[in-house]
Image: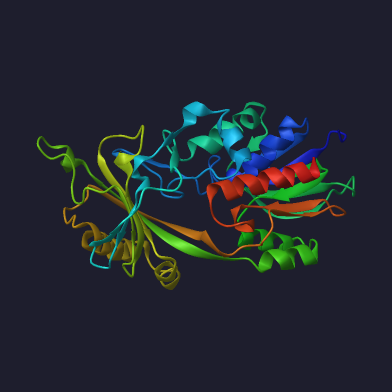
């Protein structure tokens, strides 16, 4: 076993949590830094007065046995989702294909998709090694110990802090952000160049709730299916959140726009995007009732178009590494495997 080292892992999505968790289990000291309020990344869940929405990743699959073994350590945090027989819709919302029985189960974390990453991050949080609402603005050599690294950070209220003494820094953030941070910090040009070749697409997500569907004699609104892929020019995916296990009963839908439409409207006003997606949602589902809640969220880096083509990058001399779902694809387990394999390479 290598001597104990102190690793900084930037980003507490699935890749960062898997990486940090593995390094901690190997006996190393780890500081996990996250700009948001908690772990999860795009395995995100938004809580509202009408129930929760998985407004990022909708479900996950288990193809790699290492991911399966890790899941067995937290059997209470995930359940199969019966909506794995996804419908395919034409632009008018008509079912053009009733999906065949799924080749593999679809799973969801409970009570929300963020629960899985947050459970695995609990040991780091318990030891004070998870720093949230902290954005890393620059990586630099430690002024007192040049063989080590320091992180220059900004907090929620603009306060600045420098964390020092790291033997290595591992980036588990979207490729575009990793590329920007590597370039801004003037680190390992060939590493930055490789990361810069990755391409991802954005996604606008709409969340709507219809508590009126709870009225006596009205079990649900709209279609009888719970999830569908759509060829509508605005919408790529719709899912009934209340069909997922251990969610609240109020009728709620999450709608994800297609990558081309999201790119075209990336900088649009959120209210304008919301109006357009609500219209498309009504066309696809037939639900024309006024929702009691409607909200949109923009994911700037949502789906990998051109992956890195390997699970991670590690520059042993500089002791800088990168990982993320974008290394292999865009699935939750791609993120897990990427973080795991980077940790195993450096531990």
Please tell me which residue lies in front, 32 or 99: 99
- Where residue 204 sits in the image (x, y, percent)? 41, 60
Pinpoint residue 212: horizontal percent, then vertical percent.
16, 42
Name which quarter of the figure residue 274 lies in: bottom left
Q: Residue at x 23, y 67 (%)?
A: 92
Q: Horizontal and vertical percent for residue 192?
A: 73, 64
Q: Is residue 56 visible?
A: yes
- Of residues 102 and 244, the one nearer the viewer is 102
The percent position of residue 194, horizontal first and vertical second, equals: 72, 66
Q: Is residue 197 above or below residue 333?
A: below
Q: In which quadrant is the N terminus drawn?
A: top right
Outermost residue to the left: 217
- Residue ID at (75%, 60%): 185
Query: 277 above or below 241?
Result: below
Indicate how the structure is coloured in the image.
Answer: rainbow
Front one among 122 and 94: 94
């Amino acid at each position: 076993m290598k001597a104990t080292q102190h690793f900084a892992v930037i980003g507490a999505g699935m890749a960062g949590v898997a990486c940090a968790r593995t390094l901690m289990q190997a006996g190393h000291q780890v500081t996990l830094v996250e700009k948001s309020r908690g772990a999860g990344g795009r395995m995100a869940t938004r809580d509202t007065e009408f129930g929760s929405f998985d407004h990022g990743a909708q479900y996950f699959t288990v193809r790699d046995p290492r991911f399966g073994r890790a899941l067995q350590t937290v059997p209470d945090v995930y359940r199969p989702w019966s909506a794995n027989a996804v419908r395919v819709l034409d632009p008018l919302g008509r079912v053009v294909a009733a999906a065949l029985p799924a080749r593999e189960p679809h799973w969801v974390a409970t009570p929300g998709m963020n629960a899985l990453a947050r459970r695995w991050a609990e040991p780091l949080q318990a030891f004070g090694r998870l720093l949230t609402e902290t954005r890393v603005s620059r990586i630099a050599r430690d002024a007192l110990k040049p063989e080590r690294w320091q992180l220059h950070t900004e907090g929620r209220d603009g306060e600045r802090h420098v964390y020092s003494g790291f033997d290595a820094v591992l980036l588990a953030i979207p490729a575009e952000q990793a590329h920007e941070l590597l370039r801004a910090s003037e680190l390992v040009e060939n590493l930055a160049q490789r990361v810069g070749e990755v391409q991802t697409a954005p996604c606008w997500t709409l969340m709507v709730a219809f508590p009126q569907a709870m009225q006596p004699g009205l079990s649900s609104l709209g279609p009888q299916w719970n999830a569908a892929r759509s060829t509508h020019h605005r919408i790529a995916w719709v899912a009934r959140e209340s069909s997922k296990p251990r969610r609240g009963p109020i009728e709620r839908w999450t709608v994800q726009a297609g990558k081309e439409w999201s790119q075209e409207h990336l900088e649009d006003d959120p209210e304008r995007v919301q109006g357009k997606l609500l219209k498309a949602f009504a066309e696809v589902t037939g639900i024309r009732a006024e929702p009691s809640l409607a909200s949109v969220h923009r994911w700037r880096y949502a789906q990998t178009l051109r992956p890195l083509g390997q699970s991670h990058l590690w520059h042993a001399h500089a002791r800088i590494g990168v990982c993320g779902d974008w290394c292999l694809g865009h699935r939750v387990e791609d993120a897990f495997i990427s973080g795991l394999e980077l940790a195993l390479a450096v531990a």
